[in-house]
Image (cartoon, rainbow, N blue to C red):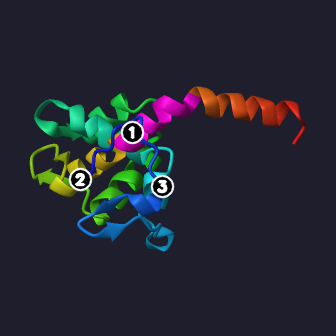
């Protein structure tokens, strides 16, 4: 993984990893998944959970505002994409726990750079939004 100095503003064609260049691939659905309201929050909560596992109810309590339906859909999609593993325990009552996979942990590392960029630029983004809204756009 490339870690750029946060003060360096590289162009996408300057950033290369193992000979690859940045080129968006929006049609694969991964960016859409990561851009929804709940996915990153669920991944993050799982990453900081004791033992790196949480039960459904624990996740629901940790992700403020998420409904049972949205958590179910989010977890199913994350499991389908291989970012989360579901562990079923045939007890009475049955117990299900969720855990990040290696790939799920890796996506959090990748999102770290985006998060730093947002932190660094949020005041400027908010200023631009205010100026745009004030101009009646």
Element type where label 1 sits in the image: helix
Mark 1 vs 3: CB contact within 8 A: no
Q: Position of residue 113 (x, y in %)?
A: 36, 42
**In whole angstroms, how far apart are the C-alphas of marks 1 and 2?**
22 Å
Earlier in the chain: of badge 1 and badge 2, it is 2
Element type where label 2 sits in the image: loop
Q: Residue at x 25, y 62 (%)?
A: 82
Residue bearing the label numbered 3: 11
Q: Nearer the viewer, residue 31 or 60?
A: 31
Q: Position of residue 107 (x, y in %)?
A: 29, 52
Q: Residue at x 37, y 58 (%)?
A: 15
The disc label shown at residue 2, or none: none
Q: Against 17, is 34 above or below?
A: above
Q: Is residue 129 left or right of residue 107?
A: right
The disc label shown at residue 41, or none: 1
Span highlighted in magenta in the image: 113-122
Q: Position of residue 1 (x, y in %)?
A: 23, 53
Other residues around mark 1 within 10 Å, as few (<14) / some (14–19) / many (≥20) = some
Other residues around mark 2 within 10 Å, as few (<14) / some (14–19) / many (≥20) = few
Residue bearing the label numbered 2: 1
120 drawn magenta: yes
Residue 65 visible in the shown view: no
Mark 1 vs 2: CB contact within 8 A: no
Q: Nearer the viewer, residue 93 or 25?
A: 25
Q: In this view, which residue lies farthest toward the right?
A: 136
Q: Residue at x 47, y 66 (%)?
A: 24
Q: Is residue 36 left or right of residue 3?
A: right
Asked which quadrant contains residue 130, the reply is top right
Earlier in the chain: of badge 2 and badge 3, it is 2
**In whole angstroms, how far apart are the C-alphas of marks 1 and 3?**
28 Å
Majority secondary structure of magenta residues: helix
Q: Quadrant of the C terminus?
A: top right
């Amino acid at each position: 993984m490339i870690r750029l100095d946060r003060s360096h503003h590289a162009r996408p064609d300057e950033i290369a990893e193992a000979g690859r260049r940045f080129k968006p691939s929006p049609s694969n659905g991964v960016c859409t998944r990561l851009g929804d309201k709940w996915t990153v929050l669920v991944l993050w909560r799982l990453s900081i959970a004791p033992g790196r596992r949480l039960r459904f109810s624990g996740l629901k309590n940790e992700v403020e505002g998420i409904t049972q339906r949205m958590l179910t859909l989010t977890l199913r999609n994350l499991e389908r994409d291989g970012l989360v593993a579901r562990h079923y325990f045939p007890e009475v009552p049955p117990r299900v726990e969720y855990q990040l996979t290696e790939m799920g942990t890796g996506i959090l590392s990748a999102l770290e750079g985006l998060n730093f960029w947002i932190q660094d630029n949020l005041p400027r983004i908010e200023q631009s939004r205010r100026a745009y809204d004030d101009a009646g756009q």
